[in-house]
Image: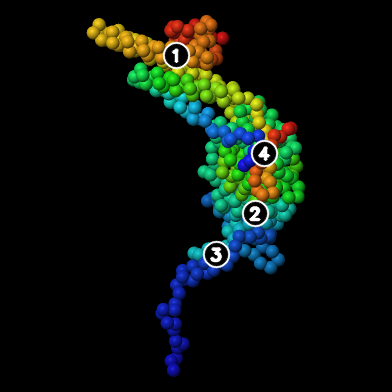
Amino acid sequence: MSLFPSGPEPAEVASVTDLTTAVAGLIREGTRECWVKGEVAEYRVWRSGHHYFCLKDARSQMRCVLWRTDAQRLRQAPADGAEVYVLGRPTLWEEKAEFRFTARTILPTAAIGAAQLELERVRALLQAEGLFDPARKRPLPRFPLRIAVVTSVDGAALRDIVAVTRRRWPLAELLVVGARVQGEGAPESIARALRVAARIPGLHLCIVGRGGGARDDLAAFNAEVVCRAIAALPVPSIAAVGHETDISLADLVADLRAPTPSAAAESAAPDVHVVRRTFDDLGLRLAQALSRRTRLAAERVERYGDRYRAAAEMLVTRRRHRLEQLAGRLEALSPLRVLERGYAVPLTPEGHVLRRAEEFVPGQPFRLRIAAGSVRARVEESS
Amino acid sequence: MTRKQGAAAPAPTLDQDLARLEEIVRRLEATDTDLDAALALFEEGVGCLRGARERLAAAELKVQQVLEQAGGDLTSEPLDL
């Protein structure tokens, strides 16, 4: 019998790293994110931006860390002695084999009801899934013709959206999907309406929201089912949960957040007058470009000389006939027709239309497009 | 979706008209297009312009309420506010 206890078989010996890694894995797999209630002690903000603190109750305490990216979202760091809820998950700091609670957010218990806790849970969950990610945001269509509106059928929000759209963009068709926007069953009702909107064929855009109300009345727009239904829409969305100060989770998930339903309608649709003017300008440039192009052709004919002149003239005559037909059609739409009545259009040398006195700089040359041709001009004075 | 008011889904053609018209004007303003091509472009541009103006002139906002029937079909009817 040996005087000394026999040693372990070398193959059975774990390194410190092996063991801590294994324990870290057990903690990771055996626990999940949860809320913990306790009292804050030794709260420290490090230069690195990470926050470290203790959370304790009558019997135990644990070390917690709040990494910088999460710490930046904290409204206010808690004072030592404050009672708080901490959302986070247990982890192992492997270098020291020490247990750490890795926090994601901290809320003072004083201010928080169950609704707020639920909101923070959903916020943390959706954030982790990337549903608030700016990279997810889709651009709104430039000229939406078919717009779904998910809101209460008899609310002020709908009336505002209809009024603004009627004034700005009457080409559109608004498809209203009614939902209960507050009280019992509101989240399910809004989510169901969003799923109906998602099935509307040929849809370009969806507005979801309600008018301003008390903070509690807006709770439905923080519900997970509503946020997920917005995220699942096949078209871009605008959330308008009429409340300037509080941002709902629906606002964060939607492609655009509008402060009010009226503002949502303003963002959704262009102003038809501006769009008409855009087309008018292009019509004018189209006419000018063609007239310059035909003048060039005529000059070229001059240069052809006698030998080709007859043939070339014939070609031009044939085209002129076609041009006259086109000009007749153009007349109905035409900026040229306005010019015929004696008006002139001032243009920059690059061909942009000058509309406001501020655009005329004294001494600056510009062109006046008149019915037959154009003249060079110079600004003497603008008022 | 069956619709009591009947219209088919409108196509987003204003976008296309605008993009095409901008392209046509750009090409016409470049002087290297030959005359035949220029005339054809002009003609097409006038068509785009007319189409866009007609659409922009169509004027009464339509407001419909969408309802889901028991079987899951969607119907719509005019909504008076």
Identify the secondary structure beneath mark 4.
Answer: strand
Q: Nearer the viewer, mark 1 or mark 3?
A: 1
Dot 3, crowdedness within 10 Å: few (<14), some or many (≥20)?
A: some
Q: Is residue B44 above or below residue A183?
A: above
| Residue A179: image location, x then y, percent | 71, 43
The structure residue drawn at horizontal position 25% and vertical position 7%, both measured from the top left corner, is A305
Amino acid beneath label 1: Gln
The chain identifier of the residue carrying mark 4 reads B
Among the two numbered marks 1 and 3 on one chain, the one whose residue lies closer to the N terminus: 3
Eye-nearest disc, 4 or 2? 4
Pick the residue in front: A148 or A185.
A148
Label 1 sits on a secondary structure element that is helix
Instruction: Classify mark 2: helix, strand or loop.
Output: helix
Q: Position of residue A146 (x, y in %)?
A: 60, 35
Q: Which residue is mark 1?
A: A325
Labels 3 and 2 positioned on one and the same chain: yes
Q: From what the image shows, is residue A54 above or below residue B55?
A: below
Q: Are marks 4 and 1 on the same chain?
A: no
Residues under labels 4 and 1: Cα distance?
45 Å
